[in-house]
Amino acid sequence: MMRRSGGTTPPPWFWEGNIQATVIERLVAVGWTVIRQANTATREPGKDIELQREDVTLWVTVKGFPNGTPRTHPNTQARHWFTAAIFDVILWREADQDTRIAVALPAMPTYRRQATRTTWFQRTADFSYLWVDEIALVSEECGTDAMSSLLEPTASGR
């Protein structure tokens, strides 16, 4: 698992870099190839992860969970980050109707509530949530029943 360097205390499991590394590890295990990944430590802009499997392209936006600041409660900041992830989906879906899109988040109650409140949009924009828990298990919540799972190997075995 990727860890932020420079500090003596490793970042928590819900840090964006750890969420990104966990999702990449899981997707590569089922046959996806990483085309590009953003440097989360430097907050590099753009798509956080771009992958390919057979003739399918996948773009993933990744958010961690905030530690909070003296001025902002973590749950408030998390709602802002969730909104930013959803805006990524809007922009990406406008740019390409065929590319698969996923939002990778730590499985925290605030994010789960926000996802539940916006299920209509998930179905309309046809994207998946990739939930990462504290023991690095990744689960998927598909936008539509017809959507194939990102976490299942392909028919070719990968």
Image (tube, helix red, strand yellow):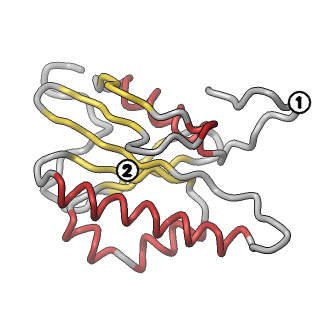
Residue 49: which quarter of the image?
top left
Residue plotted at (14% across, 20% down)? 156
Image position, residue 150 (x, y; %)? 28, 41
Indicate whether 2 appears above or below 12.
above
Name the side, left or right, on which 70 lies relative to 141: right
Label 2 neighbour load within 10 Å: few <14, some 14-19, many 20+: some
Residue, far top: 157
Q: Which residue is mark 2?
A: 140
Left or right: 96 as drawn, with respect to 91: left
Where residue 143 appears, x then y in whole percent? 25, 61
Quadrant the N terminus occupies: top right
Q: Position of residue 22 (x, y in %)?
A: 53, 34
Of the 4 image quadrants, the one containing the C terminus is top left
Q: Secondary structure at mark 1?
A: loop
Q: Could you say which disc has been placed on residue 131 in the image?
A: none
Crowdedness of circle 1 by 10 Å Cα count: few (<14), some, many (20+)?
A: few
Looking at the picture, tell me which residue is in the foreground, 105 or 29: 105
Instruction: Name which residue lies at 43% across and 41% down.
Output: 48
Mark seen at residue 8: 1
Mark earlier in primary sequence (1, 2): 1
